[in-house]
Image (tube, rainbow, N blue to C red):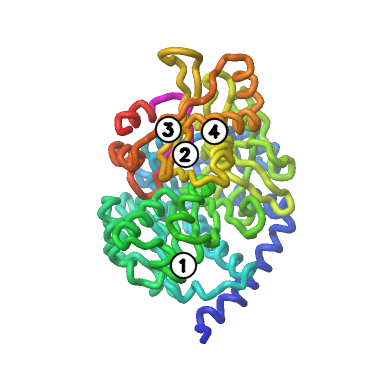
Amino acid sequence: MISLKSAIAKPFAKQVYRSIQKWAKRPIETQEKVFQNLISEAAGTAFGRDHDFISINNYADFVKRVPIRDYEALKPYVERVIEGEQNILWKGKPLYFAKTSGTTSGVKYIPITKPSIEAQVAASRNAILLYIHETGKVKFVDGKMIFLQGSPVLKLKNGINIGRLSGISAHYVPKYLQKNRMPSWKTNCIEDWETKVNAIVDETINENMTVIAGIPSWVQMYFEKLQQKTGKKVGDIFKNFNLFIFGGVNYEPYRAKFENLIGRKVDSIELYPASEGFFAFQDKQGKRGMLLQLNSGIFYEFVKAEDFFNDNPQRITIKDVELGVNYVMIISTNAGLWAYNIGDTVQFTSTNPYRVIVSGRIKHFISAFGEHVIGKEVEQAMQESIANTDVRVSEFTVAPQINPTEGLPYHEWFIEFENEPKNLLDLARKLDESLQKQNTYYFDLIEGKVLQQLKITKVKKGGFQEYMKSVGKLGGQNKIPRLANDRKIVDSFSSVK
């Protein structure tokens, strides 16, 4: 017998699909409206006055008046908001500050306003509704759902609540899902990640879990603890679990490991949320890339990654982007971020509609020898190299070895295996060949005998989790960078090999 919730979900999904199609089919016009609205709404703010928003009539005016900024450059404005001033970056005060900490930078406080959190909530809901509309699958809405996230406990300062984005989002679970939502509020408030995951295992192990969501590396930890406790595959524990929702990192390097832990394949939906905004979600199961959210109070600009560190690099809007080019994504938002570099690089897989994949971080690359290898390339190399084998990888990161004890320099891959290859050198060769195919600069360096073939350093099981714990970043939204241009991470990490 179909439930009322299931019966309502399909027509609601159809309605939302039609609404999205209206703006997705008019992308340039949609973004122009967002742009004009942002400038108009913020003209009276301190930032708007400082940058003469009242005189901005078009995008060219905006580029002249508002330079690209990262967090450090925007920080003086943010600090004024933190101290209680109003009308600084956006009208009034933000509702929240999302507290974030990057692997290579300190604590950031990202403003979240009423319209920006509403857009975040709508996008996460719409991702599921478009899945329902496309597949017709709806039974999962009657089961239990879990999102592995940070604590929802917030701290109040000068009238603004401060917390992790995932914890803030926990306050916006729709009423019709609250009975289905797990874990309990009490468990969700546990700060220590290992204690929290153990409590989540205890709470969920006998439940009808149908949807599980979170960053793959931390969901993997949850799955492993379930398996350790029961001796069963996750798919046997949760027989109706058929939808995995993830974001934050590329799922492909984890897919083989997940399917082994689950014991079967499950559908997945990729999301692209961040403290700065909810940028995209997977709108089609069979299509590569995520639908860029053009109608969510975010105006997008793009700079070619290869030009980004040049003086005065060219900034473009969606109408001028090309497929397959690596772009740094720049955003202006209804939370008061202006020409803001979030640090991500993206590539477009489609312009009708506009779909993107996250290709890496502009600061997370290896170019110690001029090769400019990016996250997408090392992930694709791993995916290709272990395809159709029984090798399973739990986690990995890559760093340059500039001063080896002997021989030429090389890229060093730190890999934690769930199931090791019979021949480590053969895997290294496959990884290297894939990287050479993808990156001509790397190919030239290998051919020119500037670099030798990459080397693999095995990491003991649980080693990455030990490292993250040692630097206070276990759990939540934290993740290991796929690669770095120095050895700061792996030098401290290598002590737990």
Marks 4 and 3 sit apart, C-alpha to C-alpha, by 21 Å
Residue identified by numbered label 3 = 414
Mark 4 residue crowding within 10 angstroms, few (<14) / some (14–19) / many (20+): many
Q: Compared with residue 373, is residue 163 higher up or lower down, i.e. above or below?
A: below
Mark 3 belongs to which amino acid?
Answer: Phe
Foreground residue, 440 or 329? 440
Q: Which of the marked residues, 4 or 1, is nearer the chain's N terminus?
A: 1
Q: Is most of the magenta stretch helix, strand or loop? A: loop
Residue identified by numbered label 4 = 362
Give the number of the mark in front: 3 or 2: 2
Mark 4 belongs to which amino acid?
Answer: Ile
Mark 2 belongs to which amino acid?
Answer: Pro
Marks 3 and 2 sit apart, C-alpha to C-alpha, by 14 Å
Mark 3 residue crowding within 10 angstroms, few (<14) / some (14–19) / many (20+): many
Give the number of the mark in front: 2 or 4: 2
Residue 26 in view? yes
Q: Which of the marked residues, 4 or 3, is nearer the chain's N terminus?
A: 4
Q: Which of the marked residues, 3 or 1, is nearer the chain's N terminus?
A: 1
Query: Residue 274 lies in magenta, yes or no?
Result: no
Please report the residue visible at 64 percent of the width from the left and 72 percent of the height from the top: 15
Marks 4 and 1 sit apart, C-alpha to C-alpha, by 36 Å
* Stretch of the chain drawn in magenta: 479-489
Residue 80 in view? no
Residue identified by numbered label 2 = 421
Q: Position of residue 368 (x, y in %)?
A: 52, 20
